[in-house]
Amino acid sequence: MTLIKLFEKQKKYLDFFFDNLDIEKANQIFDFLSTCQNNIIFTGIGKSAIIAKKIAQTMLSTGTKAMFVSAVDALHGDIAIISKKDIFVVFSKSGETKELIDLIFYVKKRGAKVIAIVSNDKSKLAKISDYYINLPLEKELCPYNLAPTTSTTIQLIFGDILTVALMQKNNFSINEYALNHPSGAIGLQINLKVEDLMLKDDYLPICYENDLIKDVLHILSLKKCGCLLIVDKSDKLKGIFTDGDLRRLLNNQNLDFFNKKMKDIMTDSFIFIEKHSLAIDAMKKMEEKKQITTVPVLENDKLIGLIRMHDIIQTGLKSLLF
């Protein structure tokens, strides 16, 4: 069977899931999880255990107290971590796995409530749990209808939707997300600030409104920022003059501009950003304007820095968007 046909078949199976899912029951599961006083504890056997672990980790990183416990290890001592304030969530396609059925008996003895997420609403696991939801499964993508393929996909979809719903209910902010992801690609996107990369103080290519262009061209060359930042005596940014502006003036073949004041040749409409903004937002501003490779950084209308596309690229941040 060709790949395209497999994609079509999987789409058909996923459509069956979405078309037949009991949304009212899904809402009940979500509402109950929202009341959890301690940890939402996930478990499963085999491939369902992998999904359960993934959902637990995603919930934890997005503001919901969650964890994964191995069903086998729970039966050999790890069940001690479960309390009556926890909600115990079991992923199982068949709902007939003996280890899980045995485990539920002991989980309930500890006072925890149990949710079964199954694809067999007549299963024993569904019957003995406090709550259950059936994830409609037409068939596995596996040609023998054996290997967990579609069943684990719909488990993952359902778990991720619950995760995001809880994230939204808890008003989980981007700043909280940043605290939970200090490293890696995600950390780079949400922790790297403009102030971490901007040029400042003596590295800034500053001149003043009444300076003559011929007297400050050396700053344009020396600072290697591709622009001059024109300020007044209180450091308020008044305009920008770029190396592109210089090339356009030279193309006019009129050298009179060398005696002009910066206020007469600068661009007084410019984009800017604040130092606490994310570096990725500064990059997006530059991308939107196409030809812009530097953005001044202002605080209370005063110039305090300059961020360059070159410095952002060196962090590897740009590559994360493509």
Image (cartoon, helix red, strand yellow):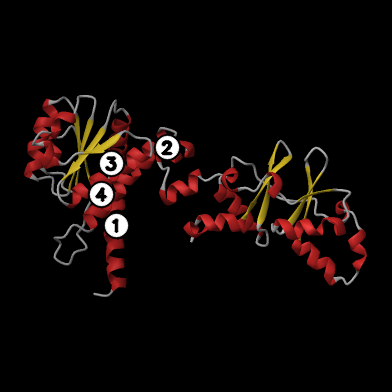
Give SS at disc 1: helix
Give SS at disc 4: helix
Q: Earlier in the sequence, mark 3 or mark 4?
A: 3
Q: Residue at x 28, y 62 (%)?
A: 10
Amino acid found under the numbered disc labelled 4: Gln
User: Closest to the observer: 129 or 149?
Assistant: 149
**Disc 1 marks which residue?**
14
Amino acid found under the numbered disc labelled 1: Leu
Q: Earlier in the sequence, mark 3 or mark 1?
A: 1
**Disc 2 marks which residue?**
168
- Locate the N terminus by quadrant: bottom left
Give SS at disc 3: helix
**Disc 3 marks which residue?**
56
The picture places residue 113, in percent across and down from the top left corner, at 19, 29
Left or right relative to 209: residue 84: left
Q: Is residue 29 visible?
A: yes
The picture places residue 36, in percent across and down from the top left corner, at 29, 28
Amino acid found under the numbered disc labelled 2: Gln
**Disc 4 marks which residue?**
155
